Amino acid sequence: MMASDESLADENSGQARRKAVMAVLAHSTTAEIAGRLTTIAVPVHEDLREPENGLVMVRGRVGGDGAAFNLGEATVSRAAVRLSTGEIGFGYTLGRDGAKARMVALCDALVQSDEFAGLVETKVIAPLRAAISAKRSRKAAETAATRVEFYTLVRGEG
Amino acid sequence: MYVAVKGGERAIENAHRLLAHERRGDRDVPEVSLAQISEQLSLGVDRVMTEGSLYDRELAALAIKQARGDMIEAIFLVRAFRATLPRFGATESVDTGAMQVRRRISSTFKDIPGGQILGPTFDYTHRLLDPQLAEGFAPEQPMTGEASMAATPRVTDILGRDGLIEPSPEAEADSIVGDLTREPLSFPADRDLRLQNLARADEGFLLALGYSSQRGYGRNHPFTGEIRFGEVEVEFMAEDAGFAVPLGAITLTECQMVNQFKGSATEAPCFTRGYGLAFGQSERKTMSMALVDRSLRARELGEEVVAPAQDEEFVMSHSDNVQATGFVEHLKLPHYVDFQSELGLLRKLRKEFAEAAEVPLMQEAAE
């Protein structure tokens, strides 16, 4: 019982780490990811699924928090990559850029490999994460400058 | 009935070649790039994505360029493109409460947690044409302020805590989310289908209907509880990966209308609501959508259906501008056979009329 709980927890934390990596990559451009990948020696790998473009139906919720409804579709590219050591990575990203989907899949495979996980985190993901964070902070600061305080005035001889 | 015609291939080919030439315009003027359209005509791109029902800025920009700026033609092109790609599935429902907000206003409360944020808006501009923009204008860098770490909960969630507003409807367990791209419309339609229809509906049509409801054709009494726009994360349950994978962020606009309260012998009165959601920065669209969504709830809320905006069959059957333009514009295609038969009938009737009245009709000129 203990063992299965532990392996479940391991799997969950593994998934959480992979999701976090995918999120960073999804927010980065193809050129940015490619640039970072040149800083590591990428091991031999093959396409398990050639990049493929398709659609996902984006769902919203009635009132923002209620039952789901179909808002409209978005283009998505997906790919799957296998390292020669067996790890399989999956790449999904908004848009129609198969090269990006393949790089996401490659990074997903690499972070599952004990040999490469640390390297990918420090050389690829961390710098991209920092760039995203800087961009978000700048946007948030620009937005914050437009914060408004409205006053209500009583009219007449109050 | 439409009877096909043949012929005219050469003329059609040449007409399209001429169209391409006209589309390009004066060749001494630089060609617009998709990036220019996407970056500088961004609200047009947002509209084409919303009504084309496909989130892809680059494709929407291409469609606008190809359609020479004709938005409905561009929307048509995007709709046709989406039919060429396979659908991988549906995303997890997006959480607009977790939006990275770039604008967020409420006309009901001036002090809301997370604050009121004007963002990039036409509101409070003087609507005077700006000659500076005519040529080579470099705007100043935006001001920056200290970003708040405070959460920005939806205003309707705040009202909901005190029970002052009706809660959002929950889905019944195992219910399938309706999809009008897969099954033809039938009436009465549930709210999920109505919202999908309104989300891709023509902005002008919804604007007019929303306006009509404000002017008294179906009473709405709305307040803008909140409008927000910004980036929302999208996740997709990927069967191969075995978990919901992040796809990136899309820009959305959401409008929550707060409407007149209702009560009954058994239920305390509370505000009701209408909802609008669209791709990109689409404020007028989402406001109109929320007004019409609320109007279309007349049946559910026990209100008398007296106005066009409350009639779901009327609204949903005429809201789609691709369908509408297809039916209106097909009238310009050759209808020679149809018209000949009408003409023949008319001549016969006129002859009978003349014989009965014993007066000669004027000779037709175009024999």
Image (tube, coloured by chain):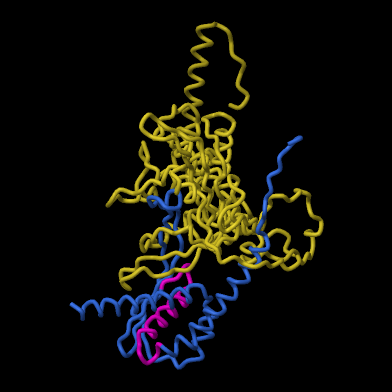
Q: Residue furthest right?
A: B131
Judging depth in this view, the residue of B234 and B77 nearest the camera is B234
Judging depth in this view, the residue of B23 and B259 nearest the camera is B259
> Residue B222, located in which quarter of the rendered image?
top right
Q: Is residue B76 visible?
A: no
Q: Write the residue at 50% across / 56% down.
A: B153
The answer to whether residue B129 is left or right of residue B247 is: right
Q: Write the residue at 66% across / 62% down.
A: B40
Residue B200 place in picture, x, y as percent: 49, 49
Q: Quadrant of the C terminus of chain A?
A: top right
The answer to whether residue A132 is left or right of residue B32 is: left
Whether B78 is drawn above or below B268: the answer is: below
Please say whether residue A111 is one of the residues in the magenta stretch. yes
Q: Residue furthest front?
A: A158
Q: Colour of chain B?
A: yellow
The answer to whether residue B350 is left or right of residue B132 is: left
The chain drawn in blue is A
Residue B12 place in picture, x, y as percent: 56, 52
Judging depth in this view, the residue of B53 and B168 nearest the camera is B168
Please say whether residue B268 is one of the residues in the magenta stretch. no
Residue A105 place in picture, x, y as percent: 40, 79
Residue B30 place in picture, x, y as percent: 72, 66
Whether B48 is drawn above or below A76: the answer is: above
Q: Write the residue at 34% across / 47% down.
A: B183
Q: Is residue B150 visible?
A: yes
The answer to whether residue B332 is left or right of residue A148 is: left
Q: Quadrant of the N terminus of chain A?
A: bottom left
Q: Write the residue at 45% across / 49% down.
A: B161
Residue range in magenta is: A92-117
